[in-house]
Each structure stands twice: as structure tokens, then as C-alpha cells.
């Protein structure tokens, strides 16, 4: 067995709003799994090799529960249109380039690197509709040490001439893709109907059948934008609400990830909660695409499973620390617009949503849980003002708002050092 001790200030969030700090702590890893955390190293382990991150912060690494890999080339651009117009003007064009596998290889290699460099070690990602590029995305994530889920997108209507499948190709390629996925890999497949307007009823039904047959999770978009919701209503006059369109076809299941849920009302939120659907809150995207401010405090009060997503490139912030800060800001906007009747998120709560809450999706425990493979970042903030005088809690808070990529000096994913 390979044992090591990591030393540093350990900061983790086992429960929503509960931060645990072990100053000058020690963490024992056995074959990459957390075997113990102490303030003082027990004598029994004093001969175990040590990695010294003294006076640096050992924090949980991040889960990006909603991102579009083939939108990486347009990151930071095209922020002048709302959702549907944005898709038709910029997004479909960008994604269509992933018919080119050489381009996909280059872009996805760089995306994987940037994710790891910023401490994102687990993802729930959309690819494009292209089968070969989806395989390449899975390979590049795997090679970089990222784990989680990647979905080949299904879309057989309302795309563009360069980005749309026939239903036959969509189903055939989905099966072919699933056959090629390595069951032992850390990157696993997830069924990904783009959103209701992108999929015919027949395709939705076929995907629901595949989900049941092959026991696969599902990810999609829900109630992001008011025009989108009205459009879904026109397409499915028999469905009282947007979520019913997924439920009708077997896509509204335990662990289904729904991005956005900005305009989900009480009935829709009740359905989210009742079915253990996971909300991927994408605060930066929701403002960039002028979608709205999601009622996250309300969802948390109701016991809904909320996680965070960068939603690049609707979101322009790839590092999850930035997304956490944005989630906090967005909760304050909600507080302002509610006449101070809803509470905002604390930094500890934002950190929990960006780490533990997502980790649960991948079978992880609470915070740095014993027995889990280590997912962590090491932040060196010693160059910032007053570090020697600050408490670890203050330094943690500042790191969330201020840490740059270069300050993340080490990253661990699945128990391995990947940066
Ligand atoms: N709804 C359908 N497709 C997309 C997408 O690519 N991004 C976002 N934000 N919403 C979507
Ligand atoms: Fe999205």
C-alpha cells in the first residue's frame, strides 16, 4: 500500500453552511484514499512520507455540473443576445466545427488542461452531437485526470443546417457511442437530449427507453428563459409544465441533472424535489444570457439538491471558485429584488455547492470523507496582503474571491496528483 501524509491548513465543507477547518493539519492518504485527518499526527504514522504544504490551504476541488465543451472556443464572446437568438447566431455555428476531429483533439486537450489547472476535477459535461469528437472529449478528460460524465448531444429538430441530426442517426450514433465507452473509465456516458425544443417526441421517447434499458443518467436544460418556456408550451400543449415534457418520456429520473431552473415555480420545484432531480445552477450564464436570477435560497430551503455549473460558454467563467463567487453575488441580487425577504448565500454555502454537493453525484461523501479518493486543490495565498495576520477562515474566503490559476499549486483527482 502506498501511504502519504499531506500537511497544510485543511478546509472542507461536510454540510451546507458548515465549514471545518483544521489548522496545520495532517491528512493520511492510503492508495489515494483519505484514511484520516488530524490536528496532530498520531505517532503510528510518523514514519510515513510527508508532502509539505505547510501554511497553504488544502481545499476540496470542484465539480462543474454543467458545461458545454464544444463552446470553449467562443468563451468570453457573443454575450449580446438572449438564449434562443444566442444559440442560433453563435452557438450552433461553433459546435458544428466539432465535425473536425483534429480540431476537437486540440480544443479538448486545452480545455481539459485549463479545467485541471483551475481545480475542476469532476464534471458533468455536454459534448456536441458528433460521435467521434465525443470519444475524443472523453479521452482527453480521462488523460488529464478528470472524472465524471460526458454526453453526446441529441438534437433532431430546431438546430441549424450545419448542426442537426436525423432521428435515425441520433439513435444509431447514441448506441454506437455507448458501445464504445469503456466501462472501467473514470469518464462515463450520460444521455443528453439538448433540451425539449431540440428533440422530437419520438427521439425523447427513444432516449427514455435507452436510459431505462442501460441504467443511464440523463442531463438537459430546464426553465432557463421565459421565451424558451413558452416555446416548450407550444410544442407540448398536453404538458402542463416544462418538466412534464421530460417526465412524459422517462427522462425525469433520480439523478437527472437539469441546468438552470431559473423560472421553476413551486409545482416544478416540487417535482424536482420529489424525483431527486439535481439542479445545476449556472449563475454567470443566467446573467450573461439575460435569463434571470434562479431562486437558489428558496430551493435550498425546500431541500432541493443544488449544484453549480460554469455553463461555458453561456457562462464566461471557467474556474469554479469564480462560479462560486458569482453564485453568492447572484443570491444577493435575488435578495435585492425580493425586497430583502430572501437570504443570500454565505461563502461556506457557496463552497459546499461547488464541492460536496456535486461530489455526492459521483458517489462521494461529505467534505473530505474517510474512504473517498482525494479530490483537492492546494492554494498558495502567501503572496497576498496580510496573510500572516489572517485567520485560515479569512484566507479561505479571500481565496474563493481572489485566487488565480497560478495560486493553485497542486490538484488531486481520484487520489492522484494531476497538477
Ligand atoms: N439550452 C439549449 N442549449 C443550450 C446551451 O448550449 N446553453 C444554454 N445555456 N442553454 C441551452
Ligand atoms: Fe447549458
Image (cartoon, rainbow, N blue to C red):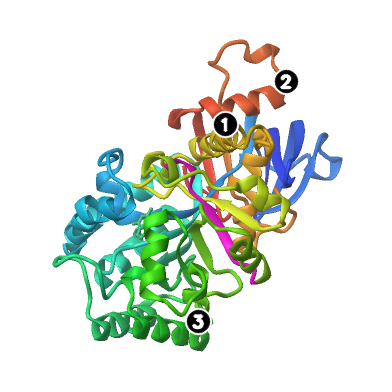
* Closer-to-camera residue (134/240): 240
Along the polypeptide, which appears first: circle 3 or circle 1?
3
Q: Is residue 208 visible?
A: yes
Q: Which residue is mark 2?
A: 391
> Which range is magenta?
275-284
Residue placed farthest to the right in the image? 43
Which numbered dot is residue 277?
A: none
Magenta stretch: residue 282 in it?
yes
Q: Compared to 40, does 62 lie above or below?
A: below
Asked if labels 1 and 3 touch by Cβ distance under 8 angstroms, the answer is no
The local crowd at label 2, few if under 14, some if 14 to 19, many if 20 or more residues have their Cα within 10 Å, is few
**Rendered-image quadrant of the N terminus:** bottom right
Crowding near the residue tagged with mark 3, few <14, some 14–19, many ≥20 C-alpha atoms within 10 Å: some
Residue where numbered disc 1 is placed: 400
At a point 71% along the width and 26% down the height, the residue shown is 393
Kindly indicate the quadrant of the structure image that contains residue 2: bottom right
- Quarter holding ligand 2: bottom left
- Image coordinates of residue 355 in percent, x first then y, are 61, 48
Exactly how many numbered labels are in the figure? 3
Residue 248 numbered tag: 3
Instruction: Mark 3 vs mark 1: give the one in front.
Output: 3
- Left-right relation of 44 to 4: right
Which dot, 2 or 3, sits closer to the camera? 3
Tell which of 10 and 319 is nearer to you: 319
Determine which quarter of the picture holds residue 125: bottom left
Residue at position x 32%, y 70% in the image:
198
Amino acid at each position: 500500500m502506498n501511504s502519504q501524509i499531506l500537511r497544510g491548513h485543511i478546509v472542507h465543507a461536510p454540510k451546507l453552511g458548515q465549514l471545518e477547518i483544521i489548522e496545520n493539519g495532517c491528512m493520511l492518504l492510503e492508495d489515494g484514499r483519505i484514511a484520516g485527518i488530524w490536528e496532530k499526527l498520531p505517532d503510528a504514522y510518523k514514519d510515513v512520507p510527508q508532502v509539505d504544504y505547510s501554511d497553504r490551504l488544502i481545499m476540496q476541488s470542484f465539480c462543474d455540473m454543467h458545461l458545454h465543451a464544444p463552446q470553449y472556443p467562443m468563451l468570453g464572446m457573443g454575450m449580446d443576445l438572449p438564449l434562443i437568438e444566442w444559440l442560433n447566431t453563435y452557438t450552433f455555428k461553433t459546435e458544428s466545427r466539432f465535425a473536425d476531429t483534429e480540431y476537437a483533439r486540440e480544443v479538448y486537450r486545452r480545455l481539459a488542461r485549463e479545467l485541471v489547472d483551475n481545480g475542476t476535477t469532476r464534471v458533468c459535461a455536454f459534448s456536441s452531437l458528433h460521435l467521434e469528437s465525443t470519444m475524443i472529449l472523453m479521452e482527453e478528460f480521462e488523460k488529464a485526470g478528470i472524472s465524471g460524465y460526458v454526453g453526446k448531444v441529441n438534437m433532431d429538430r430546431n438546430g441549424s443546417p450545419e448542426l442537426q441530426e436525423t432521428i435515425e442517426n441520433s439513435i444509431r450514433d447514441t448506441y454506437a457511442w455507448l458501445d464504445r465507452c469503456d466501462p472501467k473509465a473514470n469518464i462515463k456516458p450520460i444521455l443528453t437530449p439538448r433540451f425539449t425544443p431540440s428533440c422530437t417526441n419520438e427521439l425523447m421517447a427513444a432516449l427514455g427507453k435507452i436510459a431505462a434499458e442501460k441504467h443511464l443518467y440523463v442531463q438537459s436544460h430546464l426553465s432557463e428563459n421565459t421565451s424558451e418556456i413558452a416555446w416548450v408550451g407550444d410544442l407540448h400543449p398536453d404538458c402542463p409544465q416544462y418538466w412534464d415534457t421530460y417526465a412524459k418520456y422517462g427522462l425525469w429520473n433520480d439523478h437527472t441533472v437539469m441546468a438552470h431552473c431559473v423560472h421553476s415555480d413551486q409545482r416544478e420545484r416540487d417535482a424536482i424535489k420529489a424525483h431527486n432531480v439535481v439542479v445545476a445552477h449556472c449563475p454567470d450564464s443566467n446573467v450573461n444570457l439575460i435569463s434571470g436570477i434562479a431562486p437558489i435560497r428558496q430551493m435550498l430551503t425546500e431541500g432541493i439538491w443544488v449544484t453549480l455549473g460554469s455553463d461555458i460558454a453561456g457562462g464566461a467563467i471557467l474556474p469554479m471558485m469564480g462560479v462560486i463567487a458569482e453564485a453568492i453575488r447572484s443570491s444577493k441580487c435575488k435578495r435585492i429584488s425580493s425586497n430583502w425577504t430572501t437570504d443570500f448565500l454565505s461563502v461556506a454555502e457557496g463552497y459546499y455547492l461547488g464541492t460536496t454537493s456535486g461530489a455526492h453525484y459521483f458517489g462521494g461523501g461529505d467534505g473530505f470523507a474517510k474512504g473517498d479518493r482525494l479530490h483537492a486543490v492546494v492554494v498558495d495565498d502567501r503572496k497576498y496582503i496580510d496573510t500572516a495576520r489572517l485567520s485560515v477562515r479569512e484566507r479561505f474566503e479571500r481565496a474563493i474571491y481572489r485566487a488565480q490559476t497560478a495560486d493553485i499549486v497542486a490538484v488531486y483527482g481520484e487520489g492522484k496528483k494531476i497538477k
